[in-house]
């Protein structure tokens, strides 16, 4: 297997690279390193995989100092010709696509970045895969495709044609494009609808990080929908294990395109989640209640029966254990990494 992972300076992408490289797979990683959130964190993730910030330049391969079988290239998926050249030169067999413009709320104010990254960039990737005889493309979808009127637990067979955010609409578009390529060109594709992934090296724009940071500093957290929300929190190690199981097993049907939920199938009430962080940190949360945000939904809840039947696997890390692991990492990152990683000029 020769694996390409996109979005490796991101949360999930970083963990996939770590696992694949440690397993001895030949891995190439790409990322455009945009400034949607803290560049310091993105470069710290790269450094954790042996990619020094000072060596990262557009179009230049960087050999990992940690893994002899891992290389990194700064590349934007919207650069079609550079992407096509990459596929022609490298001869990848499998692709895990995690690069995207993330964030539901940000999509309300900057829609163009979502269209360019999540739709134009993904189409370029599909074309590159089609012309390169890729054995399996695994790509990130999202629980957000279910909208706010889907019966729970969410099943892959449910209708997903009423997105409540532009981000969700782009992820649904990804699924439709992937299905079309599977049908027309027999490109094996698997979409994974991730449910609120959290853990070490997580995203600073998501609730686990925002709440952890504010509570440890004694700052106020905003609690949307007056706390009447629940999320199917999924620990990053469980996600990595699931992806690793899926990558070497492409769909075999006449239309080789499938979609799986990946969540714990155990939603946690928002106020309970805040209470867990309070117990883990030993500090009380200062809360400001707020209404529902545009583009948000009250509940996410994954049915994982399809994933279990096909792969004998489902995420299972209890939230309290996962939050404790995240807190331990968060403290180390705040005290060690930030002091040694400078933002680029």
Image (cartoon, rainbow, N blue to C red):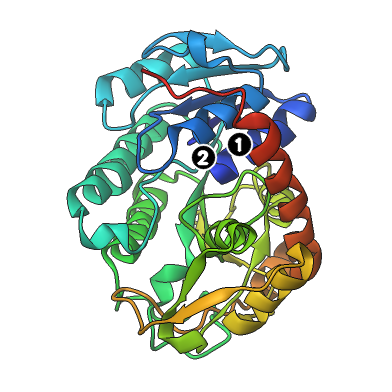
Estimate the x, y position of residue 342 in percent, counting from the top left.
Answer: 50, 22
SS at mark 1 in the image: helix
Quadrant that contains the N terminus: top right
- Residue 189's place in the image compared with 35, above or below, is below
The structure residue drawn at horizontal position 32% and vertical position 48%, both measured from the top left corner, is 118
Disc number placed over residue 58 in the picture, else none: none
Which quadrant holds residue 62? top right
Estimate the x, y position of residue 237 in percent, counting from the top left.
Answer: 74, 51
Quadrant that contains the C terminus: top left
The structure residue drawn at horizontal position 31% and vertical position 18%, both measured from the top left corner, is 82
Estimate the x, y position of residue 218 in percent, counting from the top left.
Answer: 58, 63
Number of other residues with Cα within 10 Å of mark 1, as a class: few under 14, some 14 to 19, many 20 or more:
many
Estimate the x, y position of residue 241 in percent, counting from the top left.
Answer: 74, 50
Q: Which residue is mark 1?
A: 14
Disc number placed over residue 10 in the picture, else none: 2
- Using residue 93 as the reference point, say whether residue 86 is left or right of it: left
* Residue 9 in view of the camera: no
- Using residue 53 as the reference point, say whether residue 118 is left or right of it: left
- In front: 68, or 80? 68
Number of other residues with Cα within 10 Å of mark 2, as a class: few under 14, some 14 to 19, many 20 or more:
many
SS at mark 2 in the image: loop
The structure residue drawn at horizontal position 71% and vertical position 46%, both measured from the top left corner, is 331
- Residue 309's place in the image compared with 154, above or below, is above
State if disc 2 and disc 1 touch (CB < 8 Å).
Answer: yes
- Residue 292's place in the image compared with 186, above or below, is below
* Residue 30 in view of the camera: yes
Which quadrant holds residue 169? bottom left
The structure residue drawn at horizontal position 30% and vertical position 75%, both measured from the top left corner, is 164
Alpha carbon distance from label 1 to label 2: 6 Å
- In front: 267, or 271? 271
């Amino acid at each position: 297997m020769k694996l390409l992972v996109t979005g490796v300076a991101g949360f999930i992408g970083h963990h996939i690279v770590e696992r694949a490289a440690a397993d001895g797979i030949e891995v190439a990683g790409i990322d455009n390193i945009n400034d949607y959130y803290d560049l310091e964190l993105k470069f710290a993730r790269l450094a954790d995989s042996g990619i020094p910030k000072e060596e990262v330049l557009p179009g230049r391969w960087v050999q990992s100092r940690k893994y002899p079988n891992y290389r990194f290239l700064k590349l934007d998926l919207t650069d079609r010709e550079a992407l096509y050249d990459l596929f022609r030169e490298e001869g990848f067999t499998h692709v895990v696509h995690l690069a995207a413009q993330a964030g539901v709320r940000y999509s309300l104010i900057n829609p163009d970045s979502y269209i360019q990254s999540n739709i134009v960039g993904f189409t370029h990737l599909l074309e590159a895969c089609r012309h390169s005889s890729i054995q399996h493309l695994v790509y990130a979808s999202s629980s957000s495709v279910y909208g706010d009127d889907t019966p729970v637990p969410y099943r892959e067979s449910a209708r997903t044609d009423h997105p409540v955010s532009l981000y969700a609409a782009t992820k649904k578009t990804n699924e439709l494009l992937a299905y079309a390529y599977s049908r027309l060109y027999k490109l094996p594709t698997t979409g994974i609808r991730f449910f609120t992934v959290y853990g070490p090296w997580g995203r600073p724009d998501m609730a686990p990080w925002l709440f952890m940071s504010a509570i440890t500093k004694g700052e106020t957290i905003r609690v949307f929908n007056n706390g009447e929300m629940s999320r199917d929190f999924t620990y990053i190690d469980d996600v990595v294990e699931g992806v690793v199981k899926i990558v070497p097993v492409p769909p075999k049907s006449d239309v080789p395109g499938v979609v799986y939920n990946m969540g714990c199938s155990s939603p946690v009430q928002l106020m309970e989640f805040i209470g867990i962080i309070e117990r883990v940190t030993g500090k009380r949360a200062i809360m400001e209640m707020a209404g529902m945000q545009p583009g948000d939904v009250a509940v996410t809840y994954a049915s994982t029966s399809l994933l279990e039947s096909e792969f004998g696997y489902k995420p299972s890390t209890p939230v309290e254990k996962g939050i404790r692991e995240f807190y331990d990492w968060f403290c180390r990152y705040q005290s060690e990494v930030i002091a040694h990683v400078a933002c680029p000029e």
